[in-house]
């Protein structure tokens, strides 16, 4: 378990941080995710894919749950003062703000539209459906855009 | 269905991102079993996900690993000891207690009794080991807490001391305003002319290059007097060398360790008493 953390902790923390945005929450997410991974390790099915993909999805789901529950709690107290703090509720995703430098550099090889779509799906944890609703593009287009963007990135990542 | 079409529809990405219903997942798995190209493509996409995540990794806070290991370890220990409990009790063998093998029966009874006692002893010992482990763990946690506590107390003391200086009437507050070189820079000196003590607050100064350091100067009788070099610590006052008769204070950016007399064109802020 310790090896697992040393190897993937930072990658999964990055995944969580990009979804929940704040270090405190990302820390909770990664902690919960690792406990879950440890408890359910015998349920990992190698037919379904790589071990990392499995851990990645657990972390991602934890992060998305955390994000949603924050948003719901936030909506319950609509009159609170810090209205401007959590702007990133779904439905308000108007422009991409890829604020992470590592991600930004990596995505620079893509055209703007692919950038937005991939960022939403891979880094922010939106579903294809949500992206389609948000951007007003057909679901099929969103899927192929994500796919093309990933293929393009694959060549960049493999080159390194 | 054409396999290439199937692959390029994006369904494999949805699958790997866990966005499909269980039925759809089954379908993808079946397809992957039937067509090696699909299996291969799935592996490629998963590898891209992994590379992407590794490439965009962010360093987690230092304490996180300890927290996680902490949550996991005690259970590992309990798990380990539960296997020891199963050998505790042997079901009493059913034997006929007649006069003929009275002696044998007695011996058997003694043996069973012995095994039970041994089992209980073993169980207690295991339990004690578990408890000891938990105690060790708690002691560790407590150490950490008291360490954190000391650190917090120190920081609180520091903050209170800063507050005392900043609100004291004995100290003159001198605002050091940015010069054209760095117009947004801003710092304050709290100076007590009687005790000659001086404290610096680096509210807003640009981070210097690694081979440079800021140096504070006092202007005494028209001449600059060094009050020492310092590193930026925006959340705390820095005590500088004591000074008498200061008419103004200024900060210049100098080579590491400071210089004898200020480099005037590197002056960032200045303020008169």
Image (cartoon, rainbow, N blue to C red):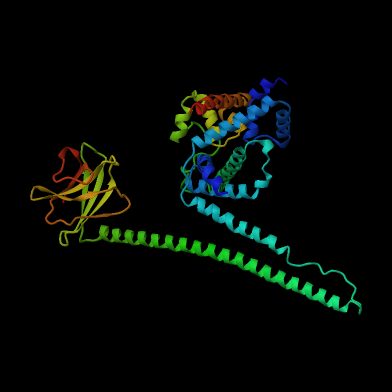
The image quadrant that residue B265 belongs to is top left
Looking at the picture, does residue A50 appear above or below residue B193?
Answer: above
In the rendered structure, the answer to whether residue A84 lies left or right of residue B110 reads left
Q: Nearer the viewer, residue A50 or A89?
A: A50
Q: How many marks?
A: 0
The residue shown at (27%, 43%) is B205
Indicate the position of residue A10 as horizontal and vertical percent values: 50, 42
Is residue B79 something that shows in the picture? yes
Where is residue B83? Give x, y as percent.
69, 60
In the image as oriented, which residue stretches furthest toward the left? B221
Residue B269 position (above or below residue A122) = below
Q: Residue B41, position in %: x, y?
A: 63, 27
Looking at the image, residue B24 lies above or below residue A12 = above
| Residue B98 vs residue A96, the one in the foreground | B98
Q: Position of residue B119 (x, y in %)?
A: 72, 69
Please give left or right for residue A42 compared with residue B113 in the image: left
Looking at the image, which is closer to me, A35 or B92? B92
- Residue A137 appears in view: no
Q: Quadrant of residue B90?
A: bottom right
């Amino acid at each position: 378990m310790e090896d697992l953390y040393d190897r993937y902790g930072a990658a999964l923390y990055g995944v969580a941080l990009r979804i929940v945005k704040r270090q405190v929450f990302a820390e909770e997410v990664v902690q919960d995710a690792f406990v879950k991974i440890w408890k359910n390790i015998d349920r990992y099915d190698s037919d379904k894919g790589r071990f990392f993909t499995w851990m990645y999805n657990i972390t991602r789901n934890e992060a998305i749950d955390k994000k949603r529950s924050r948003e719901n709690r936030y909506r319950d107290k609509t009159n609170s003062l810090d209205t401007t703090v959590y702007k990133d509720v779904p439905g308000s995703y108007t422009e991409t703000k890829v604020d992470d430098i590592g991600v930004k550099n990596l995505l620079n090889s893509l055209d703007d539209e692919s950038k937005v779509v991939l960022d939403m799906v891979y880094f922010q944890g939106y579903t294809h459906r949500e992206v389609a609703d948000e951007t007003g593009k057909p679901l099929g287009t969103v899927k192929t855009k994500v796919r093309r963007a990933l293929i393009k990135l694959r060549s960049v990542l493999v080159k390194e | 269905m054409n396999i290439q079409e199937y692959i390029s529809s994006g369904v494999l990405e949805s699958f790997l991102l866990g966005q499909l219903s269980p039925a759809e997942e089954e379908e993808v798995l079946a397809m992957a079993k039937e067509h090696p190209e699909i299996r291969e493509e799935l592996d490629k996409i998963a590898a891209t996900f992994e590379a992407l995540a590794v490439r965009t990794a962010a360093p987690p806070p230092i304490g996180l690993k300890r927290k996680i290991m902490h949550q996991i370890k005690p259970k590992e220990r309990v798990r380990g000891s539960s296997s020891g409990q199963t050998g505790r009790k042997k079901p009493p063998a059913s034997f006929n207690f007649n006069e003929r093998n009275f002696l044998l029966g007695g011996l058997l009874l003694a043996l069973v009794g012995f095994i039970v006692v041994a089992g209980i002893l073993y169980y207690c010992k295991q339990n004690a080991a578990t408890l000891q482990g938990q105690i060790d763990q708690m002691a560790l946690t407590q150490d950490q807490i008291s360490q954190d506590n000391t650190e917090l107390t120190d920081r609180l003391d520091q903050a209170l001391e800063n507050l005392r200086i900043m609100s004291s009437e004995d100290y003159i507050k001198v605002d050091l305003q940015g010069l054209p070189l760095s117009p947004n820079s801003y710092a304050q000196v709290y100076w007590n002319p009687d005790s000659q003590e001086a404290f610096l607050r680096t509210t807003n100064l640009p981070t210097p290059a690694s081979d440079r350091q800021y140096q504070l100067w006092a202007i005494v009788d028209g001449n600059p007097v060094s009050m020492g070099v310092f590193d930026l610590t925006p959340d705390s006052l820095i005590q500088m060398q004591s000074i008498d008769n200061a008419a103004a204070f200024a900060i210049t950016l100098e080579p590491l360790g400071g210089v004898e007399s200020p480099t005037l064109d590197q002056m960032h802020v200045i303020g008169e008493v």
